[in-house]
Amino acid sequence: MHKLKTITLNPAEIARIRAGHPWVYSKSIASGDAGIEAGDQVRVVGPRSDVIGVGFYHPDSKIRIRIVRREDAPIDSDWLAWRIQKAIDYRQLCYPGRNVIRLVNSESDGLSGLIIDRYDDAVLFQISSLGMERMKDSIIQAIRSVIAPSILIERNDVSNRRFEGLPEIRHIHESSLSEEALTQFTVKLAGLTYHLDLMNGNKTGLYLDQIENHELSKPIIAAHPEARVLDCFSYIGGFSLTAAACENTRSVIGLDQSADAVRLAALNAKTNGVDSRCEFIQTNVFDWLRNASSGQPDVAQEPFDVIILDPPSFTKNRHTVDAAIRGYKELHVRALKLLKPGGHLLTYSCSHHISADLLRSIAFEASLDTHRELIESHAFYQAKDHPVVPCVPETFYLKGFAYFTNN
């Protein structure tokens, strides 16, 4: 590779970036060499030409530079292989021997713009930055050298690629299975069998960041004899299946707007032998809760012992936080109206912009509106294969609470 061109930062931004935050904004840049093009690797230096690291430059992105390497050396396939291996080593410490796992979580692993998930013999990767896109061949080479999967799928079909001027792409690089079989892929995790659609499913098939919270929900559900459970935004049934597998559970209703998700959730329930306890409904969750909480016949005939709220992110930036708060508030109000006295509300937010304290305040405001007394019994966070890096607050995004109601 030719000698990297240099960009010099403003002194005011040095401390944040030296501390480990990988994002350099336009206001952070003091000057740069001529001729730097979108996607180029650049040396990032301080006012005294001291090297901070090497990253990918994009003149039209909100994030002008994504620093990836902290040495004065180019990003190549050998270094990527080493960094991916380090990320895998950390996962093996957290989850020895587990093969359904997130292996690389972008900024959490110092690889801004790259996600790698593993589902047994299948590895799926996702790229969200132009610089990483230009390294795609090296990324594939690194994955093959470190993991050697029999199935390798590119799931670059996320909408945020458009912010970097990238098209959405879905491609099978190698597979021991047919494409049809990849839409009906099966994995076992935490005692349950899941049918996944590796080609079309949300994320890359499972919400891996919630796996630990599925397990943590078990004793809460088990505390309710003959439990009736409502799982809102159930996707392919993670919380629903966990609830239905508890011996004391009488029934589970899962709600999701996606017909494909509802179909897979029903199939997963049947495969795990809990379909007699489960009902999955394709619906707008807000509409269903509104109808049920207002007493519409045949929607919810009796209140629930446990209600789970696990919605998609309602806000991707700070400008839409107020609208997101209104959405979360409505969900909590409607759910509390459907919850039995002595029941549990499990609520989650997967948006970085909705802090834990803000989620708590939303639940509190909903309790005032519904005259329900809430006691916080549990706090939940993202799984350890989605690491939280203190110097990168954006990596802490998933939080949740369990609330017990006395009345």
Image (tube, rainbow, N blue to C red):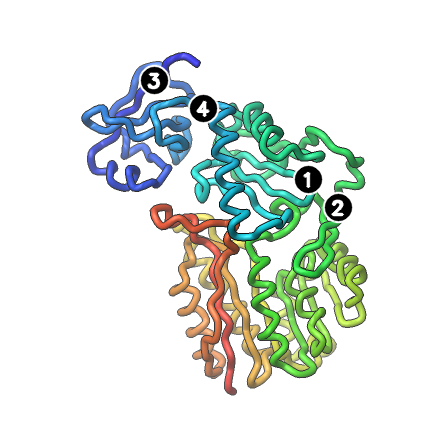
Q: Is residue 102 above or below residue 9?
A: below
Badge number at residue 122: 1
Which tag, 2 or 4, sits closer to the chain's start? 4
Q: Is residue 370 above or below residue 217?
A: below
State the residue position of label 3: 5
Badge number at residue 39: 4
Q: CA distance from mark 1 to mark 4?
A: 29 Å
Task: Tell me the SS state at disc 1.
Answer: strand
Which tag, 3 or 1, sits closer to the chain's start? 3
Q: Is residue 165 visible?
A: no
User: What kind of residue is marked 2?
Assistant: Phe
State the residue position of label 2: 185
Q: Are marks 3 and 4 in contact (CB under 8 Å)?
A: no
Q: Is residue 260 above or below residue 179?
A: below
User: What kind of residue is marked 4?
Assistant: Gly
Of the two numbered discs 1 and 4 in the rendering, the one whose residue sits closer to the viewer: 1
